[in-house]
Image (tube, rainbow, N blue to C red):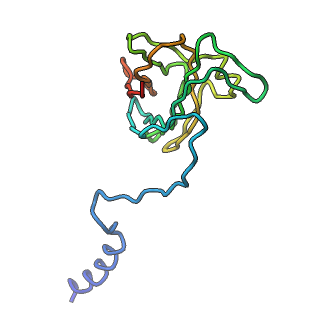
Amino acid sequence: MRPIFVLAVLVPFLAACGGGGAPNSRAAYSLPPRQVRIGETPLNGHTVHDGSLAFTPIGYQHLAYFIGSHEEMDPQGVFVRIRIVVENTDRISHTFDYARQLLVTSAGRTYAPDYQAQDVARQPEQVQIGRGDRFEFDVYWDIPVNTKVRAVRFAGDPPSAQGVSVALPG
């Protein structure tokens, strides 16, 4: 009689604890679609990982100038703006530092983000991203006119020695 009692208690308990579906299947959030900004090229959403951060560039644009919340700004060359989604894939908080993200040209030269453009656009210098959180923002670079952009190189937290690159449209 005892084994039947144990089974009668355990079977409903185990059924309630089962996740249902395939062991690796996970539901996904259905996010509302957003329009691409005027003049911006939507990117394919290719996600790469460096350190404990995942990076997904979603928009790309060359700008002759832009208007921030408090001033208009002209570049020395041309601005490149990339819209990025960063996600913390770790169990602890990590810091995103915009200054470590590099734009790579077809000649292999790298450019750091433009501090003044980031400031005028009211974009953060660093962001503490909590466990499992996502953050979306723009990074601006000021590069010489007629420079061909090849990729953006992301550096996570902790950053790897070389970072991880995503190809950009010519």
Is 3 on the left-hand or right-hand side of 105?
A: left
Q: Quadrant of the N terminus?
A: bottom left
Vertical relation: 49 (above or below) 170: below
Q: Residue at x 38, y 34 (%)?
A: 48
Depth check: give the residue in front, 147 or 108: 147
Q: Quadrant of the C terminus?
A: top left
Is 109 on the left-hand or right-hand side of 9?
A: right
Depth check: give the residue in front, 35 or 113: 35
Taking the view exactly as shown, the residue that stands out farthest to the right is 70
Q: Residue at x 55, y 37 (%)?
A: 129
Residue 74: give x, y in percent of width and height.
68, 16
Residue 100: give x, y in percent of width and height.
50, 19
| Res 123 → quadrant | top right
Residue 58: give x, y in percent of width and height.
49, 38
Is 127 on the left-hand or right-hand side of 23?
A: right
Vertical relation: 43 (above or below) 34: above
Depth check: give the residue in front, 128 or 63: 63
Q: Residue at x 38, y 10 (%)?
A: 107
| Res 106 → quadrant | top left
Depth check: give the residue in front, 152 or 41: 41
Taking the view exactly as shown, the residue that stands out farthest to the bottom is 1
Number of marks drawn? 0
Vertical relation: 133 (above or below) 163: below
Residue 44: give x, y in percent of width and height.
41, 40
